[in-house]
Every structure is written in structure tokens, then in C-alpha cells.
Amino acid sequence: MNRLKEKVAIVTGAGSGMGLEEAKLLAQEGATVILTDINEDNVMKAASDIQAAGGQAIAYKHDVASEEQWSTIVNEVMSKFGKIDVLVNNAGISLAISMLESTLEQWNRVISINMTSVFLGMKHVIPHMIESKQGSIINISSIAGLTGGSGAGAYTASKGGVRLLSKAAAVDYGKFNIRVNSVHPGFITTPMSEELIQNEQMHQWFLSQTALPRVGEAPEVAQAVLFLASDESSYITGAELAVDGGVTAK
């Protein structure tokens, strides 16, 4: 219960789905968690629920594609707590449209939310981690960032970009004892994917792609994030961790 005792963690996209489970687990393990999400009602309720369960949490409405909002939130967290030990860049959107069908507006929106937000989060948090000479950054990508998805050019590009941006940051800032890794979920049941997974035809297709005979659950991704946030992974950086039931193995 104390794997993250006295650590301060920011989790984006924490109002629902994987981000919510990540925030809840980090809080259960002793971290003070700053939850951010574009959906203000969801993120405020999430923080309230964590507090009711005995955890330490505060919430912010947050457009992760806004540098101004990143600056404001990071400055407020530093003012309140004096440090940031963990950053989980979880926020993202999915767009199942092929490259030729995508508009430039759609492309820019996916890239800004899925990849530019990761750049902005690291840009504003890493200087504070350098000051404290330690930190763990976990960037949530996707199996599409490992294999190249079909029919989702912008999404695949954004998730592949997150993977290599994580490696670049790991190389640049490892000398300050800052670790940067990416997590690559496969077919995971979340509010965003639930309708697809409940479709019997799609559910069977998902199962045909995995090695394990089921789709994954959001708390299983959270366990991977916890490991990378904790000191148990102190010699792991620049790595990608697939939480995919064996999709990429096939």
C-alpha cells in the first residue's frame, strides 16, 4: 500500500477509463494524485471518490493541447507540493478514419491531443524533475504505436510518435535520474471502447487477435503504470511495455 508513499503524481485523462484506474491505484499506493481531464464533472467526481476512499487527490479541468493550461497546472502543483515525482500522460482520443479520408482538421486534432500533449507535459514537468534530480514519466501509447494500425492513419502516427518521443526524452534526461517509458495497451474495456467490445462480431475479432482468450481491463493497464512509477522499475527507461494479451507477439 506504500509503493508511492510521499510521491506527487499527475495523471491526465483521469476522469474515466484507464486514466481513472491509474489515478485510483497510484493514490491507493500512497501518492498524492493530481487528476486532470477535459470533462470537469468527471474529473471532480473522480478526485472526490479517491478522497472518500482515504486517498489524496485534487482535480483540474484541463485541455492537454493547451500550453497555457499546462503551465498553469504545473505551476500550481509546484506551489502546493513543491515537487512532481510522476507524470502519466494518459489523455488521448481515437479516430478510426483512414489517411485518405481524414481532413487536415481531424489530423491536427488527433496529433495535438495524442502527441503534442505529451510533448507539452514533459516540457513543463521535466525542468522541475531536473531540479529534484529524479522522476518517472509514463506515456500511454497503444499497440498501434508498435505495429502500424489499419484504417487509422492519424491515430497510428500519433501513438508511434509517443513511443519515440519517450525514447528521445529517456536518452536526453536520464543523466538527471529521470526515467521515461511508454505503455502500449491492446484491446482494453473502457467507456470509449465498450460499445465496440459488446458487439459480438467485433468481440470475436478482438479475441482472434490476442494470445490470451479475452480482452483486457483498465486496472491491468494501471498495474503496469504503477510498476513504472515505482522505484521497483528504477533501472528501466526508454522501454515500451505492451499490455495487450499477446497481440503484438502474434
Image (cartoon, helix red, strand yellow):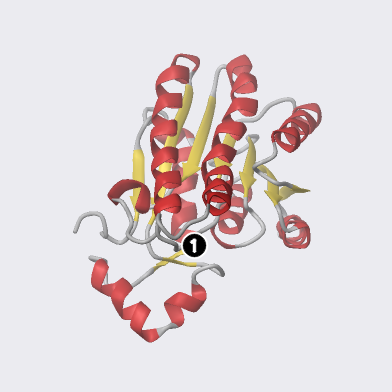
Quadrant of the rendered structure where residue 133 is?
Answer: top right
* Count of numbered badges drawn on the protein: 1
Please name the residue shown 49% across and 46% down the image: 226
Depicted 148 relative to depicted 9: above or below: below
Q: Which residue is mark 1?
A: 218
Residue 163 placement, left or right of 209:
right
Depicted 203 relative to depicted 102: above or below: below
Residue 105 placement, left or right of 218:
right
Please name the residue shown 23% across and 65% down the image: 211
Residue 98 placement, left or right of 32:
left
Quadrant in which the C terminus is drawn: bottom left
Q: Residues within 10 Å of mark 1 (few under 14, many from 20)?
A: many
Instruction: List x then y, in percent, for residue 146.
Output: 31, 47
**Depth check: 89 or 226 in front?**
89
Instruction: List x then y, in percent, for residue 81.
Output: 75, 30
Q: Amino acid at mark 1?
A: Ala
